[in-house]
Amino acid sequence: MRVAVVSVGDELLVGDTVNTNAAWLGRRLTARGASVERVTAVPDRVADIARVVNEYHAEYDAVIVTGGLGPTHDDRTIEGVAAAVGRDVEPNAEVLEWLTTEGGYAEGDLDAGTTELPAGARPLHNVEGVAPGCVVERIYVLPGVPREMEGMFEQVADEFEGQRQHVRQVVVDEPESTLVERFTRLQERFDVKVGSYPGDHVRVKIQAIDAAEVEAAVAWLRERVDEAEGNDEAEIEDDAADKDDEDEGSDLG
Amino acid sequence: MRVAVVSVGDELLVGDTVNTNAAWLGRRLTARGASVERVTAVPDRVADIARVVNEYHAEYDAVIVTGGLGPTHDDRTIEGVAAAVGRDVEPNAEVLEWLTTEGGYAEGDLDAGTTELPAGARPLHNVEGVAPGCVVERIYVLPGVPREMEGMFEQVADEFEGQRQHVRQVVVDEPESTLVERFTRLQERFDVKVGSYPGDHVRVKIQAIDAAEVEAAVAWLRERVDEAEGNDEAEIEDDAADKDDEDEGSDLG
């Protein structure tokens, strides 16, 4: 399942806000086996939202849109998503019902537009805030406030799935450039995807659907790193276990 | 000047890394008066990099691409950018010259491909690392490691410019929904852009090129917020001054 994330908000583009929502969604979607193909931040403009959502809706299995829900003039996401799929925006009876019962609001207290969604959308209730989200044609519209977004995503999380990757990470204390030849041999020998992330150390991420293949590749690389270091101590850390607490299965690192 | 940022790297899409580079670039570009129109994260795949860079190159005045530079198999940005503009990838003599003099490397120590750039590109030297960046047809290619990216951006920062916005932020202790009507009147009365960001407080961002217009709008809103709070104390903070240290002019907030 290939997914695109669209993050709406000028504050992301000017750098007032770091896009932690996209990273959170990336981790959750990856843990479920879905593949995140794009994360795009767009301004608070209906035409921009509509254009990007329309393009990704045509290309990917699902689109998650975050941000731009609410009562003020710069909350344009519902209008943009409706335009992307050629639907009107209209009051949603189920949203009104939920807000005036579970939500505890009097109808007169709700701002104009609060109950409006693209016509025919399935509402998603906001247990942490007011503005509802929705699902329309595999486009999932969620709030921008992190705790609201996270709470609403969990209501639909099981609609995202795929073949889960077994992931292991090896940390190496050599310059990345010295590893190039070993990476080539690793990929010739094993059916795994290898990512290399330089920093204070080089983090080598090895992944595949087949857990045994990943373990064999990790063992092979570990041996060749130990050799290069001229000793047989474990110079490599493996932090796969550290990440399991975030995941749903033990085969996710 | 309208700019798009393309952030290359699977680690961004799966949420292993939060895209702080894009936020940093957003702040620097906005401070110079450039308008950031898109920030898109793409996978470490040549076709994906080429497609997005090509689209944004056609649409915006400049594109900044970060990440995916280096010696390993998952560093595909140079190839992707070259494909986006229909150029070959070839060794760049200026890069080799710089790395073997200023850089302090022997030619034999450099990995295959280290000196390769799209044909005809202007090289950007990496004073904090090895892999060079470049500029080709208003596409700026920078590393993904933050200190390398920041050092290289500063070499070309003065190629990004626009009409600087005067920005002031007002923090209000009322629910966002109660402000809707005042925002409408504010925008009818003043030629300013108003952004509203809910959280523990509502941050109201008021901006325009004309500083006097912004100050008048801030004073108008402040008075109406004080009235609503039933007192004449300043219930609002203004943090414009806090941000000036990052900016080049005192008219940037």
Image (spheres, coloured by chain):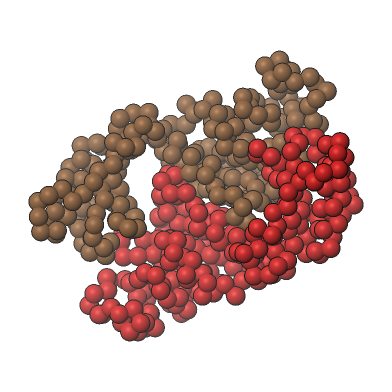
Chain colours: A brown, B red
Q: Position of residue A2 (x, y in %)?
A: 46, 40
Q: Is residue A98 above or below residue B117?
A: above
* Nearer to us in this view, A199 or B56: A199
What residue do we see at 29% from left, 39% from top? A240
Check the picture and name the quadrant holding the C terminus of chain B. Answer: bottom right
In the displayed image of the protein, which residue is found farthest to the right? B189
Check the picture and name the quadrant holding the N terminus of chain B. Answer: bottom right
Q: Quadrant of residue A126?
A: top right
What residue do we see at 66% from left, 51% from top? A10
Q: Quadrant of residue A178?
A: bottom left
Q: Is residue A51 above or below residue B144?
A: above
Q: Position of residue A104 (x, y in %)?
A: 72, 18
Q: Quadrant of residue A201?
A: bottom left
Q: How many marks?
A: 0
Q: Position of residue B70 (x, y in %)?
A: 35, 65
* Nearer to us in this view, A58 or A31: A31
Q: Name the side, left or right, on which A178 lies relative to A133.
A: left
Q: Name the side, left or right, on which B100 lies relative to B206.
A: left
* Nearer to us in this view, A144 or A167: A144
Q: Position of residue B104 (x, y in %)?
A: 30, 80
Q: Name the side, left or right, on which B131 lies relative to A106.
A: left
What residue do we see at 14% from left, 59% from top? A228
What residue do we see at 86% from left, 43% from top? B232
Residue A239 seen from this side: yes
* Nearer to us in this view, B233 or A47: B233
